[in-house]
């Protein structure tokens, strides 16, 4: 019964947004996360603001 082969997807684990490091039990986030999308979504850092590319939320930095 070897004809029931499951198509093995070679999953490329593209961790493009992995901007945090896990050391032990503590999770250290290196980027700012979106308060709307949750802690899994990181925001793009700009010079004077942070911007979420998913929901469009922008947070302006106080100078
Ligand atoms: Zn967002």
Image: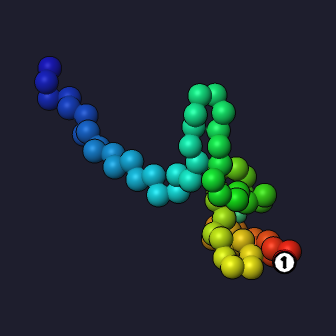
Q: Which of 4 and 13 is in front in this view?
A: 13
Residue in view at x 57 percent, y 37 percent: 22
Residue in view at x 65 percent, y 38 percent: 27
Of the 4 image quadrants, the one containing the N terminus is top left
| Up-down relation of residue 27 to residue 57 (above or below) | above
Q: Which of 35 and 20 is in front in this view?
A: 20
Q: Which residue of the protein is positioned furthest toward the right in this rendering?
A: 62
Q: In which quarter of the image is residue 57?
A: bottom right
Residue 52 pos. (x, y %): 68, 68
Say which element carries label 1: loop
Of the 4 image quadrants, the one containing the C terminus is bottom right
| Up-down relation of residue 16 to residue 57 (above or below) | above
Q: Which residue of the protein is positioned furthest toward the top in this rendering?
A: 1
Residue 18 placement, left or right of 9: right
| Up-down relation of residue 52 to residue 8 (above or below) | below
Q: In which quarter of the image is residue 7?
A: top left
Residue in view at x 63 percent, y 69 percent: 44
Q: Mark 1 points at which residue?
A: 63
Find ligand 1 in the image and state its quadrant. bottom right
């Amino acid at each position: 019964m070897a004809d029931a082969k499951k198509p093995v997807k070679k999953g490329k684990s593209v961790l493009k947004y992995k901007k945090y490091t896990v050391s032990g039990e503590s999770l250290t986030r290196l980027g700012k996360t979106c308060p709307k999308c949750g802690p899994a979504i990181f925001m793009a850092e700009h010079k004077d603001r942070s911007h979420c590319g998913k929901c469009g939320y922008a947070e302006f930095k106080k100078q």
